[in-house]
Image (cartoon, grey):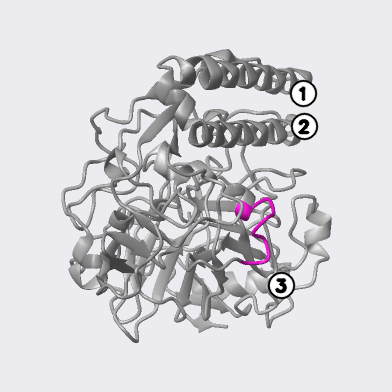
Amino acid sequence: MGRNTRKRRTPLATKVIAGAAALAIGGGGLVWANFYASAHEKNGGHNATKSGQARVATINCPDVGQKLTKVPRKARWGVARELARLDRQITEAYSRLAETRQAQAGDASYVDNAILGPLKDKRRATLDRININIKRAGGQGRDLGRFARCQGVPADQPGGGMNGGGQDGGNQDGGGQDNGGGQDNGGQAGNGPAADDFIRIEDVQPGTRNLPNGLAANGDTGSTGSFTTVCGTNENALRNSDNVIVAPGVSNGAQHQHDYVGNQANTAFASDEDLAGGDTSCQNQGDRSSYFWPVLRIQDGTQDIDQDQPGGGQDGNVGKIVAPTEVNLKFVGNRTSEVVAMPRALRIITGDAKAFTNGLGNANTAWSCTGFEDRQVTDKYPICPEGSGVVRTSSFQSCWDGQNTDSANHRTHVAFVGEDGSCPNGFQAIPQLQVRLVYDNIPAPQADNGQLVNPYAVDTFPEQLHKPITDHNDFINFFDENLMNEMVQCINSGQDCQ
C-alpha cells in the first residue's frame, strides 16, 4: 500500500463526491471500526490509504453524559469519573472491532457474543455506580440500565440523515456527512479522516452558514463594544489530553490533545484555587482564564512526541501536531441588551467532541480559509489555495442562567441567543467569547491514485474518525473582578478595548 511517488498527484478536491450518503445517527454513540487495519496501530500505519480495501461496522451506544441534566453537585466528581470510564469502554470496543476482523468474517455472531455482550455488562456496572453516586449525594436515582445496551449496525446498512435540528440547518455543499460508504475510513491510523471530509473552499457558497446563535453578535442596538485579550499562540507547547471540565480528576479524560493558552495550570486535577493562582500567558495578567481546544495534526507519516502515549498514538491520534500561527480572543456584546459580568470559574464548552455520533444538536463548528471567511463549512475540512491559511472559528454561548458556573451536562447553565439576539427567559446576556485560530503552516492534502496523502485533522475520541464536525472549544473564566468590570463597561459603552 506504499505511495508511488512517480504517479501524478491531483488536488484532493477533485476526488470529493457530492451527494455522499449521510450517516445514520439514531441518537446514540456510533462506534466505527476499520476492518483492514487496527485503529491504534502503534506506529500509525502509512500516510496513504487506498480506497476499496476496508469494511466498516458500527456500534450504537447512548451518550449518557448528555442525558444527565440533574446531578447533585457533591456527586459530579464521581459521576464524571464513571462517564470517562464509559468512554474508555467504547474505545476498547472500537479497538476489538478493528482487531478481530478475521474472527468476525468467520462467525456471524462474533460481534454480539464477544464484543456487544461484554460491553453491555461493563456499561451496566458503570451505570450502576453512577446511580450510587447520585443517591449518596441525595439525588433521585434513575433507570440508567436502559442505556447499557449497544446495537451493532451492519456495514451495508443504508445511511439515514444526519440528526437534524440543533444549530445547523444543513450542509453547504449539498454533500452531507460522509460515512465512508462502508469502504474506507482513511487516515494514517485507519480511523480517518477520509477523502470526502475535505472540500475546496472555492466550492463553498458565500454566506450559506447561518446558525441561530448569530455568529456576529454585534448589532445596531444593545451592547456593541468589544474587548480583546492577547494570550499568545501556545508558543511553549502546553498540551495534555485531560479535560478538567468534563472529566475532573481523570488523566487522559479527553483521549485527545488540547492546546492551552491563558492559564498555565490547567490539568485534570486543577482546582478552582489552582487555576485562580496559576500563571497566565495573557499580556494582561488580570486574565488568568483558560482557553483550550483540540490540536490539529498533519498525517504526513511522521510522529509527534506522544506517538506511544495516551491521547496520542494510543488513542488513534497520529501525525505531527501543528500550532496555530494566530490566536484571536475577542469578547463582544449582545444585539438587544447590555451584558453582565461573567462569574468567576464559569465554564463553557461550545461544539461537541462527539458530534459525529451524537448528531448536530450541540455542534458549533466553523472551518474556513483566510481571504474566504465569508465561506464557512461545518462538516468538511477546507482545502485552502496557496497563500491562504486554515481558519477555525468558535462563537460561544452568551446567555447565562444567573446562578451556576457549571451544570451536570456542562450545557444547561448557558445558552445561545435567539435569532433576534435575545436570551431565553431567566437568562442574562454575558460577553460572547469568539475564538479565531489561524494555521498558515498546513499544506493542502492531495489525492494520489485513489489514495489520501498528507491530510490534516483535528484530534478526536477514537470512534469519532477525526471528523471536522467534532471540533469544539473550551473556556474557564478567571478574569479578575476589576478587569471583568472593565470588559463589561467597554462592551456596554460601545468601545473597542484591549
Q: CA distance from mark 1 to mark 3?
A: 36 Å
**Residue stretch rendered in magenta on the structure:** 304-313
Residue type pointed to by label 2? Lys
Residue 148 visible, this orientation: no
Quadrant of the image containing the C terminus: bottom right
Badge nearest the viewer, 3 or 2? 2
**In the orientation shown, which residue stands out farthest toward the bottom?**
387
* Numbered tag placed on residue 137 in the rendering: 1
Residue type pointed to by label 1? Ala
Q: Which residue is mark 3?
A: 482
Q: Quadrant of residue 360?
A: top left
Chief secondary structure of the magenta portion: loop
Q: Position of residue 199 (x, y in %)?
A: 26, 64
Residue 460 vertical position relative to residue 277 in the rendered view, above or below = above
Residue at x 36%, y 25% (from the top left corner): 153
Residue at x 62%, y 80% (from the top left corner): 232
Does the residue at mark 1 contact the one at mark 3 (Cβ under 8 Å)? no
Question: What is the number of callouts on the image?
Answer: 3
Residue at x 31%, y 33% (from the top left corner): 24
Work out whether residue 381 or residue 285 is closer to the camera in this orientation and state it: 381
Q: Earlier in the sequence, mark 2 or mark 1?
A: 2
Q: Position of residue 479 (x, y in %)?
A: 69, 67
Residue 59 vertical position relative to residue 169 in the rendered view, above or below = above
Q: Is residue 126 magenta?
A: no
Q: Which residue is mark 2?
A: 74
Does the residue at mark 3 contact the one at mark 2 (Cβ under 8 Å)? no
Q: Would residue 125 be found to the left or right of residue 103 on screen?
A: right
* Secondary structure beneath label 1: loop
Q: Would residue 57 be found to the left or right of residue 306 on screen?
A: left
Does the residue at mark 2 contact the one at mark 1 (Cβ under 8 Å)? yes
Q: Position of residue 207 (x, y in %)?
A: 21, 66
